[in-house]
Image (tube, grey):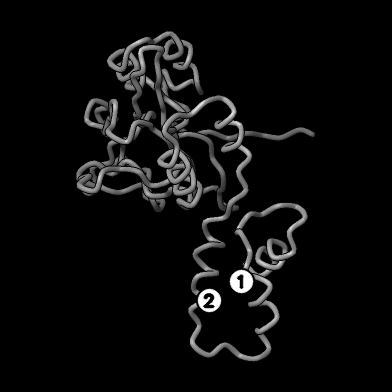
Amino acid sequence: QPFTMLFSHHGPIISRNEAGTRAVTVRSVWFEPGSAAYLQSLTMLRTTTPEAFRASAERWGAPSVNLVFANTAGEIAWSPGGFMPWRQTWKGLLPVSGDGRHEWAGFIDPASLPFRRNPEAGFVATANEFNLPDDWPHETLPVGFEWTEGSRATRIHEVLEGQPSHGVTDSAALQTDAFSVPARRLCALLAAMPSPPATLAKPLAFLADWDFVLSATSGPAALFELWY
């Protein structure tokens, strides 16, 4: 199928009007020199210290991810990675004119991004949730606006916090863990209903003794997922 691809100096054109007088383009760090996807992992996989890992993370181009580190000496670390444009006149959430008034002014200095090394919790874990420090200066360093809902991270942290040690078998179990944090949260609200309608008596009883695990053979799990 022949297809004509159009580009501007900002990036690919994704829409234009019939008269050809207006076009919408997408500028992305994916098109910037040095941002080849995951290429920096070739260097990062060879790092053996948190300091070397941090230096490697500062050169990570795309995609924007959470990076975690561990070595055989028992040291662990976490760092975000990814080129983040410095926009002086806008946030990047909505289209703006491409007439030169809203150009990128380079990238946010990766050395200014947060970094955790050997935290007191004894582990680092991430599931794409919002995990910037509580005092992060979002106005002056706006690194992002969208994160995945945090239930997976909540579950991972609960499991790891309850384990004095963690091995391969534990990791396999956690990878296939089907416990639902949203189910636990919402069922607690249902149980606290002061005067539920009589029509809800049967489904509420069905969910009352559920362990909140979304197993394939669980009736309460099927009911909850259809409702949720």
State yes or no: discs 2 and 1 in contact (Cβ < 8 Å).
Answer: yes
Residue 215 falls left or right of residue 44: right
Find residue 160 and report its image quarter. Answer: top left
Other residues around mark 1 within 10 Å, as few (<14) / some (14–19) / many (≥20): some
Residue at figure coordinates x 38%, y 32% from the top left = 124
Q: Position of residue 121 (x, y in %)?
A: 32, 36
Secondary structure beneath label 2: helix
Residue 226 versus residue 163 in the image, above or below = below
Q: Amino acid at mark 2?
A: Ala
Residue 161 versus residue 145 in the image, above or below = above
Q: Amino acid at mark 1?
A: Ala
Q: Earlier in the sequence, mark 2 or mark 1?
A: 2
Residue at figure coordinates x 58%, y 51% from the top left = 179
Mark 1 lies on residue: 208
Other residues around mark 2 within 10 Å, as few (<14) / some (14–19) / many (≥20): few
Farthest residue, direction right: 1
Q: Position of residue 80 (x, y in %)?
A: 36, 31
